[in-house]
Amino acid sequence: QDKDALQVALKFIIHFAGDIHQPLHVGWTTDEGGNKIPVQESWDPSAHRMNLHEVWDFGIIDGMEAPTHLSEEDIAKNLTQELKTGSMSGSLEAWSHCGDRADKTNLLKCVTQIASESIKDACTYAYKDDQGNLISQGEDLDEAYFATRVPVVRSRLAAGGARLAGILKYALSATSSDRLLFA
């Protein structure tokens, strides 16, 4: 049963780390994080009506895969390389360490910081078009919307991965007394 509890805990941490980095997961409550804003995505040849939240959950990533036939694994490998030696390498240290381990309020501070980043991206990029207007019901999100949001999604994915790695490294390198909390 301890093994099952560890597996559930690990799944929760992975899911939470991903969700909190998706801007609309901390979006406005009035529209349920974009779930109540139906949109179309004309950048996708198989465009179908979906909501704004779905666009940010998978639509933009699907669009990133399509032109070059990249898999999600390929995207992850590319982001990992960018984190190690590329354009995002300067952010790796900040993303993978969130404050002082000895500070017992650190986790709350880290989660608050990440959520603040996500809501800023939601307000700046997810909920607005390229002219700064709020996305309206049924709006067609065009190629310009997609192209200008890909860097945001890539950054959020990379930050989420780096932070997840930092959390796991911290948990797995805990002292023997701390390990009892994870066992």
Image: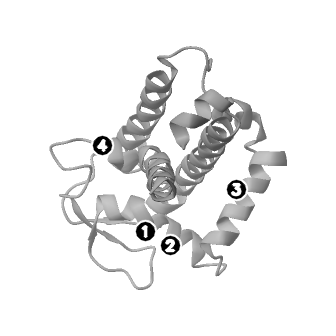
Where disc 3 sits, the SS reads helix
The residue sitting at 46% across, 59% down in the picture is 4
The residue sitting at 54% across, 47% down in the picture is 156
Image side of residue 129 versus residue 174, left or right: left
Dot 2: few (<14), some (14–19), or many (≥20) neighbours within 10 Å?
Answer: some
Dot 1: few (<14), some (14–19), or many (≥20) neighbours within 10 Å?
Answer: many
Q: Give the amino acid type for the residue marked by disc 1 in the picture.
A: Gly
Q: Which mark is residue 79?
A: 3
Q: Which residue is mark 1?
A: 59
Dot 3: few (<14), some (14–19), or many (≥20) neighbours within 10 Å?
Answer: many
The Cα–Cα distance between marks 1 and 3, rounded to whole angstroms, is 18 Å
Cβ–Cβ under 8 Å for marks 1 and 2? yes
Q: Nearer the N terminus, badge 1 or badge 4?
A: 4
The Cα–Cα distance between marks 4 and 3, rounded to whole angstroms, is 25 Å
Q: Of 5 and 34, which appears nearest the observer?
A: 5
Residue that extends furthest to the bottom in the rendered view of this protein? 46
Residue 128, can we see it? no
Q: Which residue is mark 4?
A: 27
